[in-house]
Amino acid sequence: MQELFEHLIWEVEGNIALLTINRPEVLNALNADVLKELDLWSTKIRSELEQSNNPIRCIILQGSGAKAFVAGADIKEFKGKVKIEAQSISSRGQRIFKQIEQLPVPTVALIEGYALGGGAELAIACDFRLAAPNAIIGFPEVKLGLIPGFGGTVRLPQLIGYAKAMEWMTTAKTVSAYQGIDVGIFNAILDNENEDILDQAKKWIAPLCSMAPLAVKSIIFAMKSQQSLYTPELFEKEVELFAKLFETYDFEEGVNAFIEKRKPEFQNK
């Protein structure tokens, strides 16, 4: 698959596979090209994983470099977009993340540095999240006059509870590894300073990879069947509200302020 990608690195070592989002110069931000490649990858790997002789038992997703897992969507691509284009962006991101969420083997987000906005939404679409001590996760979209648009408003309350999810998203709160593990968004903090973070992650998932593959898959499918709570209407409402905000002054001001590296002056219009 490697020849398909410019911004993804796909490696398989034994029964563990590693997908790296490789745009370190922009903190692995999700632009249209990365999303296109994630779409291709998740479609192709699903068909391969469904073959009985496939050796992969777990997939680790990470960002390139220690500064960020994924620092969010590429905000510069939002500038000048109109409502119908925003609907397409949100719907596409939701569809791709749902494909990743529904892969038939466990997925683990290995988070070093920032996982913000779309990056946080990608992380919570995975089955597990492992944090480096420097991990920071959050949903800062309101600072741009936006809301999470790739499924965050649906998945986050299911993961950490309604009250905390409401607080995080409406205040743009960012949360450290140690704060995040307290509320259950992280499964573990990998804090052995004498060992590479990826090696620590592989050790953490080793018991998972040693279990009966069909039984693990069955647990995944059984647990994910509870996602019937994720009704299509919830995701559609997120798309609608995300896109509608692209027509507001505050969105334009938020994006311009982000690009110009200044504090936005919102006017509630």
Image (spheres, helix red, strand yellow):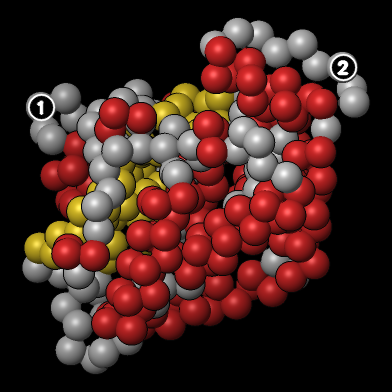
In the image, residue 41 sits, relative to residue 118, either above or below, namely below
Q: Position of residue 45 (x, y in %)?
A: 30, 74
Determine the image quadrant of residue 10: bottom left
How many C-alpha atoms fall within 10 Å of the one at disc 2: few (<14), some, or many (≥20)? Answer: few
Give the side of residue 234 with respect to residue 176, left or right.
right
Say which residue label 2 marks: 267
Q: Position of residue 132 (x, y in %)?
A: 31, 32
Q: Identify which amino acid the numbered label 1 is placed on.
A: Asn
Say which residue label 1 marks: 194
Q: CA distance from mark 1 to mark 2?
A: 50 Å
Q: Quadrant of the C terminus?
A: top right
Q: Position of residue 64 (x, y in %)?
A: 25, 38
How many C-alpha atoms fall within 10 Å of the one at disc 1: few (<14), some, or many (≥20)? Answer: few
Give the side of residue 63 with respect to residue 223, left or right.
left
Disc 2 on helix, strand or loop?
loop
Q: Residue at x 69, y 74 (%)?
A: 228
Q: Identify which amino acid the numbered label 2 is placed on.
A: Gln
Q: Quadrant of the N terminus?
A: bottom left
Q: Earlier in the sequence, mark 1 or mark 2?
A: 1
- Confirm whether residue 1 shows in the render: yes
Q: Residue at x 41, y 47 (%)?
A: 129
Closer to the camera, 223 or 55?
A: 55
- Confirm whether residue 181 shows in the render: no
